[in-house]
Amino acid sequence: MFDLRYHVASLVAVFVALIVGILVGVGLAGSGVTKKADLRAAQLQRDDARAEAQQYKQQRDQAQKLAGAFGLAYPQLMSGLLSGKRIGVLYVGSIDSGINQSIGETLQDAGAEPPTRTLSVSIPVDAQSLDSSLLDKGGKLVKYVGDGKLETLGSALGTEFAAGGQTPLWKTLGSDLVSERHGNARQPLDGIVVVRTVKPQQGDTMRFLRGLYSGLTAAGYPAVGVENSGTKLTAVKVFRARGLSAVDDIDQMTGRAALAFLLAGAPPGAYGTGSNANAILPTPPGA
């Protein structure tokens, strides 16, 4: 609704169809093949295309007005919403600078500090390398060894990321799993943002990620998966299946508001402008 690119693209498509229809009609009429009934049908098709184009224009104008109105309300809605909250960001794959900027803007607009910690997980995972590192460390970590334990291992890592503290698994497996790390690993988090920048995975990596996503929500704090609007290989259904909320338009002002609302305790769900969204925005916390 608020993403005007789709309305503009649709409007252009309608006008192209209109022009093609007129040219075809004129060409057939000039050849003497088209009868009056055919011309009438072409005229009706032209009129329908014009009406559809007008409808898209009205929708575009309405979207612009609504976006403008939301822009005026945005600062008040976001003010102090995440004040004092510690938020962590976990990338499944490499860090995306554009999404990272959108997350940073969300936290700043909502009165939070920059992310307490940001970590990117190397994908795909090497199960044998993980087992080797765990066996070398020995002790209690041996219980996570084996292909059948990948989901359990992922869950434990997700819980450690949220809780902070000693994080023995992340320390042991850092060279195997972590491609980039920033911030304080010890402080507990009040909310987590997850970004998947790789294509959907299968086999060992799929099982590991399934556990990782579930572990992030185990502490009971808000965990939200985010992506840009129009993402082709969307992760919304995956996030929701593992207990995370989802925002599919973090590059939009409404997406940033949705993320802040969810991190502040709004009802979980899928929000944004994509086909898997329940609504554009959740109900603001405390409303």
Image: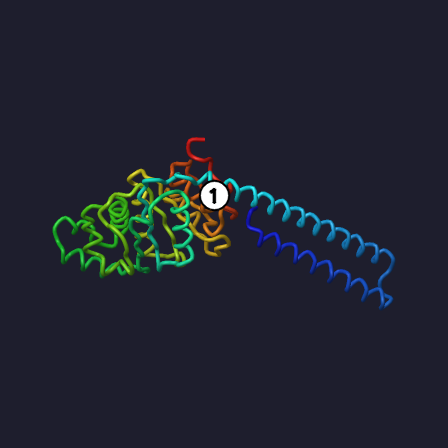
Q: How is the image coloured?
A: rainbow
Q: Is residue 239 left or right of residue 164?
A: right
- Is residue 115 or residue 274 the one in the foreground? 115
Q: Residue furthest bottom?
A: 31
Q: Quadrant of the C terminus?
A: top left
Q: Residue furthest top?
A: 287
Residue at the location (29% across, 43% down)? 189
Query: Residue 230, position in %: x, y?
Result: 51, 54
- Vertical side of 98 occupied by 280: above or below: above
| Residues packed near mark 1 inside 10 Å, few (<14), some (14 to 19) or many (20 plus) | many
Query: Residue 224, position in %: x, y?
Result: 38, 45
- When asked about the image quadrant of residue 95, the answer is bottom left
- Is residue 6 or residue 133 the one in the foreground? 6
**Which residue position holds label 1?**
271
- When asked about the image quadrant of residue 178, the answer is bottom left
Residue at the location (31% across, 60% down)? 122
Regarding mark 1 in the picture, which secondary structure is present there?
Answer: strand
Q: Is residue 28 left or right of residue 217?
A: right
- Is residue 94 or residue 213 the one in the foreground? 94
Query: Residue 167, position in %: x, y?
Result: 20, 49
Residue at the location (31% across, 38% down)? 220
